[in-house]
Image: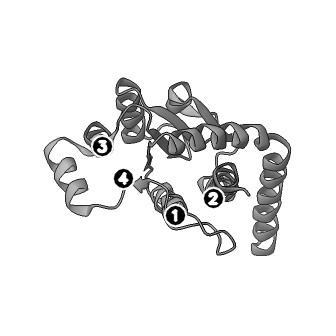
Amino acid sequence: MNLTQRIQAALEEALRLKRWLLEEGGPVLLEMSGVTAACLRGGGKLLFAGNGGSAGDSQHLATEFVVRLSAQRERPALAAMALTTDSSLLTACANDFGFQHIFSRQVEALGQPGDLLVAISTSGNSVNVVAAARVARERGMGVLGLLGGGGGDLLPLCDHALVVPAGNAGRVQEIHITAGHIWVDLVEERLYST
């Protein structure tokens, strides 16, 4: 495959997955937005966890909730935080307990019944995200997933999950962020439509 063909193949796969999101993703996004709006309306918060690009998506989506998605809608800040951002906490926990506990330790400290963990993993098998989901369950929290492949070990721990049917992490992340923007918009609409 030459370079031009690689470009074409990548974009065709991206288009296929956007079409999948259009045709199959709507019901899951509606469910996720309803659960999220209820959580926030009830005084709960969103805790986001993911590794690598999914850590970036965690930060990006938490920011959309706290700040806002669009300048077209003025609204109060919504309670959300990415568990991926505190370098002192992450390195201390990884050093003292192991990298597999960097998110579960924070869920143990910060998570309350009625809160939601948003587990983001392109494979569904990120050990530290799975551990966080297990602790979230123990604490009476809900778990939402943005997953890839077949959903992996995270899928049975999620109340609702958007599972992108692809194995290429980059393509899965592209759909996660598109779906994430739609999800935030739906939550804002549920909470603040006039």
Mark 2 touching mark 1, by CB under 8 A?
yes
Can see residue 86? yes
* Mark 2 / mark 4, whichever is N-terminal: 4
Tell me the residue that label 4 is attached to. 83
Q: Secondary structure at mark 4?
A: loop
* Mark 1 / mark 4, whichever is N-terminal: 1
Mark 3 touching mark 4, by CB under 8 A?
yes
Residue depicted at x 56% and y 47%: 122
Instruction: Give the spatial CA distance, label 2 vs label 1.
Output: 8 Å
Residue 116 drawn above or below residue 185: above
* Mark 2 / mark 1, whichever is N-terminal: 1
Residue depicted at x 49% and y 42%: 119
Foreground label between 3 and 2? 3
Instruction: Give the spatial CA distance, label 3 vs label 2.
Output: 25 Å
Left or right of 3, for residue 89: left
Instruction: Give the spatial CA distance, label 3 vs label 4.
Output: 10 Å
10 Å crowding of disc 4: few (<14), some (14-19), many (20+): many
Q: Amino acid at mark 2?
A: Ile
State the residue in front, 25 or 167: 25
The quadrant of the picture occupied by the N terminus is: bottom right
Q: Which mark is residue 19?
A: none
Tell me the residue that label 2 is attached to. 177
Q: Amino acid at mark 3?
A: Leu
Tell me the residue that label 3 is attached to. 110
Tell me the residue that label 1 is attached to. 60
The image shows a total of numbered marks equal to: 4
State the residue in front, 121 or 41: 41
Residue 164: x and y in percent read: 68, 44
Instruction: Give the spatial CA distance, label 2 vs label 4.
Output: 17 Å
